[in-house]
Image (tube, grey):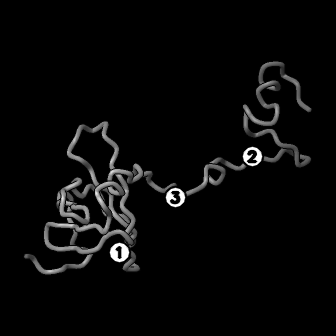
Amino acid sequence: MADLVSWRVIERGWSVVDAEGNEIGKVDQITGDVEHDIFDGLTIGDGGTVLTRPKYVPSEHVAEIREGLIALDLSPEAASRLEPYTAPVAKQLADLAPAPEQGPRGQRGGIPFGGGGLLRMLFGRRP
């Protein structure tokens, strides 16, 4: 049996097994922060098509990490109920929207389709 290793050396394609030793998939992606040594979890795929969504395994269910093998503490039933992985959003959508431009008297008017801008564009009226 291979020696225990750090989460930092996990590679894509390593086997992932449930608590009974049944292979449930292969490592697809490791989630965490290497700079701060935080292991969040991993995603596993079943080797299916590109349309198959990887499942997410939180780090608290990783019992052992050995060269080429990740052992989970989940029963086969619990492993089959793992949720699909959803990548975290780095910024809220509101933070990505450009700030509205201010008119001469503090009026909004720089975004053509927000705050009545579309009506002004169509009918040429200014508030």
Compare residues 119 and 93 and report the one nearer the observer: 93
Say which label, 1 or 3, has the lower sequence index. 1
Q: Is residue 89 depicted above or below 103 in this figure? A: below
Q: What is the x, y in percent for residue 44?
A: 28, 55
Amino acid carrying mark 2 in the image: Pro
Give the spatial CA distance, label 2 vs label 1: 38 Å
Q: Position of residue 50 (x, y in %)?
A: 27, 38
Give how far apart the Cα atoms at labels 1 and 3 are.
17 Å
Q: Quadrant of the N terminus?
A: bottom left
Q: Is residue 1 above or below residue 109?
A: below
Label 1, on which residue? 34
Residue 112 position within the rendered picture, expressed as x and y whole percent measured from the top left: 73, 32
> The residue under label 3 is which amino acid type?
Ala
Which disc is residue 61 wearing? none
Drawn side of residue 95 relative to residue 116, left or right: left
Mark 2, residue position: 100
Q: Secondary structure at mark 3?
A: loop
| Residue toward you, 54 or 122 | 54
At 37% from the left edge and 79% from the top edge, which residue is drawn?
A: 37
Determine crowd level at label 2: few under 14, some 14-19, many 20+ residues with C-alpha closer than 10 A.
some
The residue indicated by pointer 3 is: 90
Binning the other alpha carbons within 10 Å of mark 3 as few (below 14), some (14 to 19) or many (20 upward) gives few
Image coordinates of residue 20 in percent, x first then y, are 21, 63
Q: Residue furthest toward the top?
A: 123
Q: Could you tell me if the residues under marks 2 and 1 are in contact, i.e. CB atoms within 8 Å? A: no
Mark 1 falls on what kind of element?
A: loop
Nearer to us: label 2 or label 3: 3
